[in-house]
């Protein structure tokens, strides 16, 4: 046994590799087999397993890429190929960089000019509830900020262990982050029968279940839900805020899909609702709110840009926050620029606005997708209210469940594996996110191009009907 193998941190050992990694590896093999000319019922793999919009076929926004290109290579601004507003934005952003170069370090919290833009955006979004730049930290993606806050909250040498309440279902990256810092996971279940509603009664049950096992210090919420696709009402958020105040819990609000709201639903940030509730809650409830350029309308996952806004933290604690965020110098400068472009897009009258606005107003078709999925026998799906995913429930035949168990697989993993092999569609099983015992789900992204989505539904329908027939 090697020296390193003996000394690997036990919390890292507990970070189990996702079962989805096997599917992802097989998808890569299938793509290579197709390149080598192997005959299959399809000519390409459709990957809707993640919220990576560019990978799913959506083209990057011209305005964003033009500004980034001009910042990387300022000589482009001497040509007449770039719109005037692109050149103006690039000059302003370069002027905010040390040495007028994106290759320079920035302040630990981010380029001050961009941090102020984020603060102005938050104040507009929240109906005038003030945001203060000194409470905002830009990071290499929102998950990086979440992990940093967990490091601040979790005492991994405490007895009993530090606990964090998280929703079921919950995306796997946060679960991995909790394992990494040595936190005890305290699950609370969203009510699927009521459209994945977050119920305060369930929060009380989860908190009670933790007694004698761990010491819960925080509540993590995802709004809009991932993978559930639910959007919390103002009243629901008020109930959660009241709960964390009474139980003296820190509130972690993951709001990265706030731009994707459908139908009659409306997005309310936790920061806004807290501010509008007034004292004493607005002055005492400790909150961290997260947003990202990866999951927003820009879809720039690879640039790794996000931010956290902190509310009501003691100045002594903020000193530790600064230390945590400064240990890696700063977030990537191009990611910081992407955040600026996300919160301050082209306005009416700007040369880039017509094209940007046309793309931004595209119909994302969630109601149609839900209707198609619900038309398939063995599927049931609540309307998608927000976010990037549909998360239908699979009512699998007993024979399929037995077959999966014989193969040593979760039933929904078995279904996703067959869908990949026979239909050429890569999705994620509900077992990756947590689900009630005896229920099965799959998750797939609803944001690809129309052509890709039509082909996806065609393949899913054909495969599913044959699958149900085979195991009936």
Image (cartoon, rainbow, N blue to C red):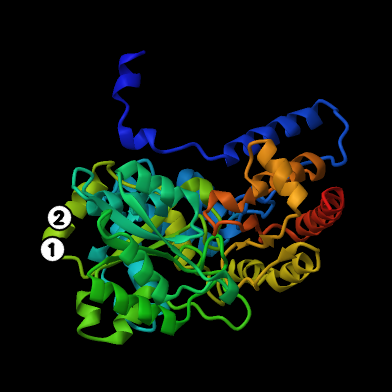
**Residue at the (32%, 85%) spot, across then down:** 276
Q: Image check: 150 left or right of 298? A: left
The answer to whether residue 132 shows anywhere in this view is yes
**Residue at the (14%, 65%) spot, across then down:** 314
Residue wearing tag 1: 315
**Residue at the (63%, 36%) spot, across then down:** 408
Callout 1 crowding tier (Cα within 10 Å): few <14, some 14–19, many ≥20? few
Contact (Cβ within 8 Å) of mark 2 with mark 1: yes
Q: Is residue 194 above or below residue 2?
A: below
Q: Secondary structure at mark 1?
A: helix
Q: Secondary structure at mark 2?
A: helix
Residue 338: % across, % down: 46, 56
Residue wearing tag 2: 319
Q: Image check: 48 left or right of 267? A: right
**Residue at the (19%, 43%) spot, across then down:** 157
Frontmost residue, 236 versus 335: 236
Callout 2 crowding tier (Cα within 10 Å): few <14, some 14–19, many ≥20? few
Q: Is residue 263 above or below residue 466?
A: below
User: Which quarter of the image is occupied by the N terminus?
Assistant: top left
């Amino acid at each position: 046994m090697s020296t390193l193998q003996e000394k690997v941190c036990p919390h890292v050992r507990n970070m189990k590799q996702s079962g989805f990694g096997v599917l992802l590896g097989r998808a890569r093999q299938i793509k290579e087999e197709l390149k080598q000319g192997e005959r299959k019922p399809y000519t390409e793999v459709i990957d809707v397993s993640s919220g990576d919009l560019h990978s799913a076929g959506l083209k990057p926004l011209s305005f964003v890429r033009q500004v980034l290109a001009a910042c990387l290579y300022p000589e482009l601004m001497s040509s007449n190929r770039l719109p005037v507003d692109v050149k103006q934005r690039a000059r302003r952003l370069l002027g905010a960089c040390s040495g007028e170069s994106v290759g320079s370090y920035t302040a630990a919290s981010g380029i001050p000019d961009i941090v102020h833009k984020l603060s102005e955006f938050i104040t507009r979004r929240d109906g005038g509830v003030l945001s203060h730049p000194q409470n905002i930290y830009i990071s290499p993606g929102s998950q990086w900020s979440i992990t940093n806050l967990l490091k601040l909250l979790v005492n991994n040498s405490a007895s009993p262990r530090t606990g964090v309440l998280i929703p079921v279902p919950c995306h796997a990256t946060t679960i991995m982050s909790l394992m990494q810092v040595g936190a005890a996971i305290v699950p609370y279940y969203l009510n699927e029968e009521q459209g994945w509603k977050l119920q305060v009664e369930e929060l009380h049950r989860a908190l009670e279940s933790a007694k004698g096992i761990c010491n819960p210090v925080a509540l993590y919420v995802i709004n809009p839900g991932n993978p559930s696709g639910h959007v919390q009402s103002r009243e629901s958020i008020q109930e959660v805020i009241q709960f964390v105040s009474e139980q003296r819990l820190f509130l972690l609000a993951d709001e990265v899909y706030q731009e994707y709201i459908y139908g009659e639903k409306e997005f309310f940030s936790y920061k806004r609702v807290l501010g509008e509730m007034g004292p004493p809650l607005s002055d005492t409830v400790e909150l961290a709110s997260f947003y990202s350029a990866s999951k927003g309308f820009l879809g720039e996952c690879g640039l790794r840009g996000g931010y956290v806004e902190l509310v009501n933290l003691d100045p002594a604690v903020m000193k530790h926050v600064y230390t945590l965020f400064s240990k890696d110098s700063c977030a990537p400068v191009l990611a910081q620029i992407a955040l600026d472009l996300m919160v301050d897009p082209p306005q009416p009258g700007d040369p880039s606005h017509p094209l940007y606005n046309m793309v931004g107003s595209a119909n994302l078709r969630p109601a149609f997708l839900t209707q198609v999925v619900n038309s398939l026998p063995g599927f049931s799906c609540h309307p998608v209210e927000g976010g990037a995913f549909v998360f239908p429930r699979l009512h699998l035949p007993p024979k399929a469940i037995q077959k999966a168990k014989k193969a040593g697989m979760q039933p929904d993993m078995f279904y996703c594996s067959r869908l990949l092999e026979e239909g050429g569609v890569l999705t994620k099983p509900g077992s990756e996110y947590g689900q009630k015992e005896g229920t099965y789900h799959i998750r797939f992204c609803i944001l690809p191009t129309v052509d890709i989505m039509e082909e996806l539904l065609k393949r899913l329908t054909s495969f599913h009907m044959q699958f149900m027939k085979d195991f009936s």
